[in-house]
Amino acid sequence: MSINKVLVVDDSATDLLHLKKIIEDAGYLTLTATSGQEAVEKARAHQPDAIFLDIVMQEMDGYEACRVLTRDAATKHIPIVFVTSKNQKADRVWAEMQGAKAFISKPARQEDILNQLKALQ
């Protein structure tokens, strides 16, 4: 699978811009969303090659967005990577159960993001 377009989802403007910059500087086209609901809508409309998704958000959290995306025929093929401050073992297990391919703890390091993008290729 070739990764060209990445959807970055976080309700924190600081974290969103940090992730967006890392991914764009690596040469990827980057879309952004600030809620789980917006992520679902943008994923359906723009069909990104990967989604980097926060868990703790208003309106629709990352777990719910992941469930919706992985159960929708139009988006279930898109790999989802959680990038979150929730880093307990139970959070990782729950993320996997929702269909996430990987889990990165905040603060997200450039090396971790780039390694994950390579792993998804």
Image (spheres, rainbow, N blue to C red):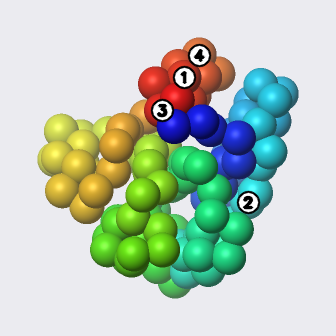
Q: Indicate which disc, 3 or 4, sits on the residue closer to the N terminus.
A: 4
Report the amino acid beneath label 1. Lys
Alpha-carbon span between mark 3 and mark 4? 14 Å
The reply to whether callout 3 and callout 1 are in contact (CB within 8 Å) is yes
- Asked if 110 appears above or below 41 in the picture, the reply is above
Q: Mark 1 = which residue? A: 118
Q: Where is residue 54 in the image (x, y as percent from the top left)?
A: 50, 55
Alpha-carbon span between mark 2 and mark 4? 20 Å
Report the amino acid beneath label 4. Glu
- Asked if 9 appears above or below 101 in the picture, the reply is below
Q: Position of residue 41 (x, y in %)?
A: 61, 80
**Dividing the picture into quarters, in which one does residue 61 lie?**
bottom left
Which residue occupies 77% across, 37% down? 28
Q: Mark 3 = which residue? A: 120
Q: How crowded is mark 3: few (under 14 residues within 10 Å), some or many (20 or more)?
A: some
* Disc nearest the viewer among 1 and 2: 1
Which residue occupies 34% across, 43% down? 101
Report the amino acid beneath label 2. Thr
Using the image, tell me which numbered label, if any, was put on residue 111: 4
Residue 9 falls left or right of residue 92? right
Kindly state the secondary structure of the residue where label 3 is placed.
helix
Using the image, tell me which numbered label, if any, was put on residue 32: 2
Residue 101 falls left or right of residue 39? left
Q: Would you say residue 104 is visible in this rendering?
A: yes
Kindly state the secondary structure of the residue where label 2 is placed.
strand
* Disc nearest the viewer among 1 and 4: 1
Q: Indicate which disc, 2 or 4, sits on the residue closer to the N terminus.
A: 2
- Asked if 93 appears above or below 48 in the picture, the reply is above
